[in-house]
Amino acid sequence: RAARARGMALVTLTDLDTIDGCMAFLDRHPDAGDFFISEELLAAEPHSGARVSVLVYGLDERQHRELQSLKWEVRDVAAYARAEGLVASLGSLLPVLEAGGSEGLVRDLIQAFDRFEIRNGAEDRACNELMARLVQETAAGRSFGVTAGSNAHLAARIGRTTTVAKATGREGFMQALRENRTWAEGEHGRAWATFAEVLRHVPLHRAAQPLVDRAVTRARRSASVRQAKRRLDRADIQKFQEKAKSYRRTGHGMEPGPGGAR
């Protein structure tokens, strides 16, 4: 109801490694035409030891079971989803970078997928913009799709970050996802908004430690984002310098002398 009240025409649940919530909803509302089954799969990237989120939309119980058996290698998840015609969207790659994964490893993962969650309503703007930058730089030149989600655990944030498409009905929306005709819309995560949301539902004496843990996690992730951006900036500068050297070696143009322009 909260999602529909905020203007969403279609709704799904992406619970972590389970579709039980989706199935329970359909048991209560078997004729719901504005709902479809989805899940968030936490899949392993074995080279770095990190685990990354893959959002899978429009699956059934058989496909859920198969995906659970494949989640020990995120590339197997991507291959299975593609073979089954499932919409699979790769979530934040910050865990791979935090685990020491190289730029090449990150690009390899991006090449394995066709869609990417570039706006997570529980992550701050810097984290979401880092994901968007990684995707844009790696997937440039080929068709790819984007998704967004609230990542809400309480009703206050449901429907505030959404995947949008010019489509009618469930099948039309799913087709837009498959054809990469969607865009991300809505809010980025904000630390104080999250804290206030928790405090509205949980007594302070019970919420204090989780809030402290959350603050520490956010601080660590913010530091990781800044470090990752610096790495990318250095890589971009190095690529530019190498390109400039190559340009000079080909003999195109003239390299300025000591008194030349700067």
Image (tube, rainbow, N blue to C red):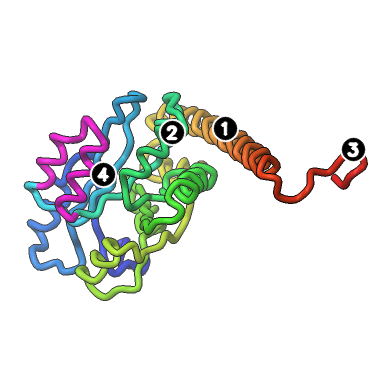
- Cβ atoms at labels 3 and 2 below 8 Å apart: no
- Considering the numbered disc 2 on the image, is that residue within a helix, a strand or a loop? helix
Left-right relation of 195 to 179: right
Mark sitting earlier along the chain (2/1): 2
* Circle 2: residue type: Gly
Residue 72 is covered by the magenta coloring:
yes
Residue tagged 4: 40
* Circle 1: residue type: Arg
Q: Residue at x 40, y 41 (%)?
A: 92
- Say which quarter of the image contains residue 239: top right
Which contiguous range is marked in magenta? 63-85
Left-right relation of 114 to 34: right
Mark sitting earlier along the chain (3/4): 4
Mark sitting earlier along the chain (3/2): 2
Q: Residue at x 51, y 43 (%)?
A: 130
The crowding category of the residue bearing disc 1, from other C-alpha atoms within 10 Å (few below 14, some 14 to 19, many at least 20), is some
Q: Mark 1 to mark 3: distance in Å? A: 32 Å
* Circle 4: residue type: Glu
Q: Nearer the viewer, residue 11 or 166?
A: 166
Q: Mark 4 to mark 2: distance in Å? A: 25 Å
Dot label at residue 104: 2
Mark sitting earlier along the chain (4/2): 4
Quarter that holds the C terminus = top right
Dot label at residue 258: 3
Q: Nearer the viewer, mark 2 or mark 1?
A: 2
* Circle 3: residue type: Pro
Residue tagged 1: 231
- Considering the numbered disc 4 on the image, is that residue within a helix, a strand or a loop? strand
Mark sitting earlier along the chain (4/1): 4
